[in-house]
Amino acid sequence: MPHDDKPATRDYRDDERYHPQRIETKWYERWQQDDSLYRAEATSTLPKYYVLEMLPYPSGVLHMGHVRNYAIGDALARYMWMNGYNVLHPMGWDSFGLPAENAAISNNVPPREWTLHNIDNMKAQMKRLGFGYDWSREVTTCLPEYYRWNQWFFLKFYERGLAYRKKSKVNWCPQCATVLANEQVVNGCCWRHEDTLVEQRELEQWFLRITKYAEELLGDLDKLEDWPEKVRLMQRNWIGRSEGTLVNFKLEGGTGSNISVFTTRVDTIYGATSIQLAPEHPIVADLTASNPDLRRQVDQLIAEQRKAKEVGDVGAIDKHGVNTGRCAINPYNGEKVPIWIANYILMDYGTGAIMSVPAHDERDYEFAKKYKLQIRIVILARATDPEETVVEPPLPFTALDGTLVSSGPFSGLSCEEAIKRMSKHAEEQGFGIATVSYRLKDWGISRQRYWGTPIPMIYCDKDGIVPVPEKDLPVILPDKVDITLTGGSPLSRVPEFLTTTCPKCGGPAKRETDTMDTFVDSSWYFYRYTDAHNEKAPFDSKTVAYWFPIDQYIGGVEHAILHLIYSRFWTKVMRDMGLVRNDEPVQRLFTQGMVIKDGAKMSKSLGNVVTPDEMVARYGADSTRLYTLFATSPDRELDWQDEGVEGISRFLARALRLVKFKLCINSDQSEWNAPVPSDLFPEARAVQRKLHQTIKRVTEDFEGRWHFNTSIAAVMELVNTIKAAPGIDYEMPGNKELLPPLRRELARTLVLLLAPFAPYLAHELWEMLGEKGNLLREPWPKYDPALAKEEEIEIPVQINGKLRSRLVVPADAEEEFVRERALADEKVRAALNGKQVDKVILVPGKLVNVVIR
RNA sequence: GCCGAUGUGGCGAAAUGCCAGACGCAACGGACUUAAAAUCCGUUGGGCCGUAAAAGGCCCGUGCCGGUUCGAGUCCGGCCAUCGGCACCA
């Protein structure tokens, strides 16, 4: 190579080094002074694009999971800006919740102060990381401007019968000293305190009737084609729809009282040999009234169930029960069946009572074996041998493809047919009905905590439960509250808050002192971003109609059920209220993978925590962000490696030097701005081809699978290619140099390709190139397929699938030509060794495979 | 137990039926330097053959076993392991 004698290296002067801190603080300060760069336009001729990342809880500092989440969203937002969209990219704070109270207790700082201070800090971190949010639309859920609309919605829900009060068993976390929704109980423990067993308590609670929307929430999952299948499946399982039949068994010798049983297999009812009740079933009180000994045994069962539920191994409980000595009448055949009470029957599913069919249910079988209860076969498997029509199966036989026997008029039917006919029969006879049961429960939203939205209800001795009139909203959360005492809601110890007058009769009354679950806040916050300062309504419906649905929502999979099912519910209610037109809030959902280190989730106890602050201080925001995108594809788990960030930082330094010292050469403006000639010499043409191939790859990654790791790898390859290009360092004789117009195209495009991922450096280089325009509004580069196309390609030639040779042929070579060249190839002929060619597989532009026998 | 995802060099990973390991890290060798840092150039899955050294060639290799296919990391079936969700749901 002629330039080997040139010094390949030299000492790098200070200005040749990459100083992320200098570059980033310079732009940070500019953007601090003018943050209009990232504003969404209220009205625009441009098409809209709403990209949203899940809002954080302001715990105090950002962690790497946040950075990853926001780096993905920000890259997309920037890409869409450059593609000419009116982009809405907002951020806010899910700022009610328990940690603020705990911090208040341990640090003696009021929750409000603590929270607002954390928000300041995290907002500064976000800005330092260069995320492009429209801060003019910032939403902070703990401020009255926001939570008054929670209260307003609550009143509307109440009017529509979607909010109701009920005494019920609730999940109680002794650590939180409050109630948890079913969704917040994990393995029998609190979702925030993994070691704290959840207790069951009986309390008066407010519920939202999400079950009314169960069917639609389930059905519409099919429409969410741009959601990960995993999330849809998790929601489907959570809703847990099952079709079945309610059947009333009359109590023998009773006063006409019934036991209602839910079953999905009414076809097996002729095999029912007992009734099993949950120990907490209401009728148990009657059955045990005159039998203290039985009562004691039932209490024992209750205690066992609670314990099992608390420990979280409900499935492993040793099944046992007691015979009440009473019987019920099977309405299908008038048969007497004994009533038992068993610890494996749950009160909170179905009716809390089952018919036990030992021959056709595993649990019933196990139970019957233990107590030597009668086992009666009423379903036979269909025979595989046509001579035999039915087969006696091994027990328990639970499959649905069988034939009924010993089932009165229903004998001979298939199971599925029998379920239909027998349900109908029950309806006609008035002792049962086909029905649907859900696992999903109504959403209990009362929390006996201070730092949340006060539930706007008043209790009057005379008028009962009275909603706070809309005009009196917001019900302000008082500031000075002693939250260190335990037991009951903190607000109940604030007389000024508690005591009020009844809006109806004007008499003395008391306020509700519970606050709302914080999942209420996050169920509709993304609507508020569209119209964040509206004082008359939660938002303007027309404005929402412009922006919704959210085009792209990005967050962790841990919200697959809780937040994402509540928000879907909220949207459907708002639609029914006429506030929004969309059935679903989110068009596309993306769930990014976790950030781990050394094979484990980052945690203080493991000492493997890497903080964004230290990374930004060492390598800068661009490198930190770029690394989270480069390490792996966004949907996968990211294993953090400090050396990786180092590598990314070196790459950015190379890109900087390439643009600054190699591509920007002294040439006059007219030369620099001239069009790239079409007759480039081959080496320059090769660089140009690489450029267009890179644009293609990065663009396709954005439009398709979001594998930004490969996009960034492509840009690295481009940098490597340009750097190694002949003629980059000096002018070769004749026309063998990288002409200024080509250098300009290379430099500009490289900067544009980096812009979504490394905004600071991109802006710096853009300015360095003498560009005056707004980088975010610079059109995303387009590739020219003709320029991206290879002129010559190397084609592997295989014999029976094994690589034997390679051919270099023109990219547009005819198939016949390639085939001939392949068969004529010296190595191929040697390998063939005169054997007969069976056929030749030719994949155009890809390979040749010669098949021999 | 049921449902789902994942499994590729020393490491993070590429490869959407077609040259396995792009890109990056680490390691090693070299250039530059009084020296170091930085930077630049090069080598790097394993084994074998070949050569003075190269060039070059062959075989094996994507958790395991089998199948489909001209061709499998990729598709199908069965195992194993790890992770995640649900779990007496009647």
Image: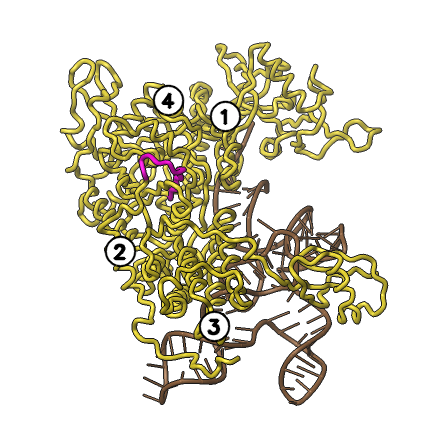
Chain colours: A yellow, B brown
Circle 3 sits on which residue? A727
Q: Quadrant of residue A686?
A: bottom right
Disc nearer the start of the sequence (1/3): 1
Label 2 secondary element: helix
Give the residue pinned by disc 4: A578
Q: Chain of mark 2?
A: A
Gap between marks 1 and 2, in whole Å?
Answer: 58 Å
> Which mark is first along the chain, 1 or 4?
1
Q: Secondary structure at mark 1?
A: loop
Say which amino acid is labelled 2.
Tyr
The C terminus of chain A is located in which quarter? bottom right
Q: CA distance from mark 4 to mark 1?
A: 33 Å
Left-right relation of B70 to A537: right
Residue type beneath disc 1: Gly
The residue under label 1 is A350
Amino acid type of the residue that numbered disc 3 sits on in the rendered structure: Gly
Residue A280 appears in the figure: yes
Q: Nearer the viewer, mark 1 or mark 3?
A: 3
Q: Answer yes or no: is residue A615 visible.
A: no
Q: CA distance from mark 3 to mark 4?
A: 66 Å
Q: Crowding at label 2, few (<14), some or many (≥20) Cα neighbours within 10 Å?
A: some
Provide the residue span drawn in magenta.
Answer: A41-53
Q: Is residue A255 magenta?
A: no
Q: Which corner quadrant of the image does residue A834 belong to? A: bottom right
